Amino acid sequence: MTTISPLQPRIFSLDTVPDIEDKRASDPGLLFANNNEIAKLEGIGVDNENVPRRKMTIAEGLRPLLVSMKMFGLYFNPPPEDTGNDRKKKWKWNAHRIYAVTVVVLLWINAVRAITVFTRDEVFGVVLLNKLILINWSLQCAVSQTAFYAASFSGRLSIVFDQTLDDSCANHARKSATLYTAVSWLVVVSALSFIVYGLLITGGEKDYFLTPLQNHIVVSNPLIPRIVVCFIVLYMASVHIFSQTTTFVLARIFSHQFMKVSKTLRHLLETDQRHVSDSDIEMLRQKHQLIAMNVDHIDDCLMFSNASAFCCQVFAAIVLLYTITFWHSVVTDVVFISCYVFWIFMESVGLALTAAGGIMVHHYVR
């Protein structure tokens, strides 16, 4: 297969297939528009008299997940090319972009604010370890939010989401997106519930989340700051969960596309003639190359999110395990014990998703 350059500045859509050897664009009908030929290669009968129905795009298949991402500024559509003088479309796009920028700025301010959590009276113990986890988590969320904003602003995510899916992948994507979104929301609500309990119900047990308030600036009635922090935690939990869920779903989609190419080639080799024509080989080569290039460009944008998620979750898992192992006698509240167990489980699942996504794509792309 032709070597893929990571320096290529574009993501190619399914309408144009690059030919690296000839330095020209191949005929898009050879690979994607000619559905009859591809269907025959995969052993699927096609009725030429029927008008082909509209294919589902990745964005349509992942609609529940994308709606949740847009709610927290993780994704927004780039401005349409046909906007012209349509002020309504321009205003709508600018509003989504401004909202996404606002969330990015908010999370970076929150990350800087978290660094002020330490005081001169700190001693090594559960509280200090929890503060380290808070700083670690704040930085991870800020980096992930920034990475997804850059991917949305550049249009790379939109180009990938606008690509079409075959029928089997479309049905699977729709069901998986609904399940993943429901589970993600369940995790977000659970994480927020533990923080609300620590801030509003225990009478200030987790007031270090309010830093610099209560740490450096004492407030007599910090109810409003506690409520504000609960909203910030909602955004942090959503960024933490939905960013990793989206990355994993994209990895599964790319893996499925690679698998379809391999399956088609295997089907051709298992025929009675055991012969693959040059045109079929070129078609499969270009399709494999296209998927690989899209993976490469998406990775260029989201690699910082993946790297921060992996490193920060490893650190958090180590600190949480250390706390549970050596300081379990200090943590006596049943809810807080459940909180530690919950976050250890979630950090482990997050690490598994990040690692599994990379392993799946690497397995099929090689």
Image (cartoon, rainbow, N blue to C red):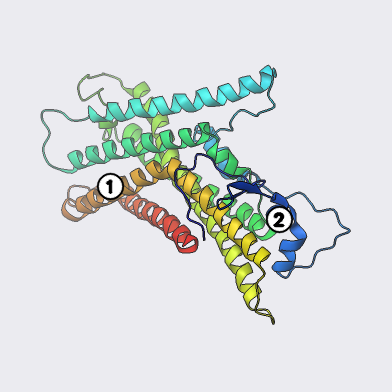
Q: Position of residue 311 (x, y in %)?
A: 30, 47
Kind of residue indicated by mark 2: Leu
Q: What element carries label 2?
A: helix
Q: Can you name the residue that lies furthest to the right here?
A: 49
Q: Could you say which is closer to the camera, residue 272 or residue 23?
A: 23
> Residue 66 sits in which quadrant?
top right
Q: Position of residue 67 (x, y in %)?
A: 58, 38
- Residue designated by label 1: 316
Residue depicted at 48% across the width and 44% down the height = 297
Residue depicted at 26% across the width and 41% down the height = 133
Q: In this view, does 133 lie to the left or right of 350?
A: left
- Residue designated by label 2: 30
Kind of residue indicated by mark 1: Ala
Q: Is mark 1 on a helix, strand or loop?
A: helix
Nearest to N terminus: mark 1 or mark 2? 2
Q: Can you name the residue that lies furthest to the front here?
A: 22
Instruction: Give how far apart the Cα atoms at labels 1 and 2 are.
Output: 50 Å
Q: Can you name the residue that lies furthest to the bottom here?
A: 272
The reply to whether residue 283 is visible in this rendering is: yes
Q: Where is residue 131 in the image (x, y as percent from the top left)?
A: 23, 37
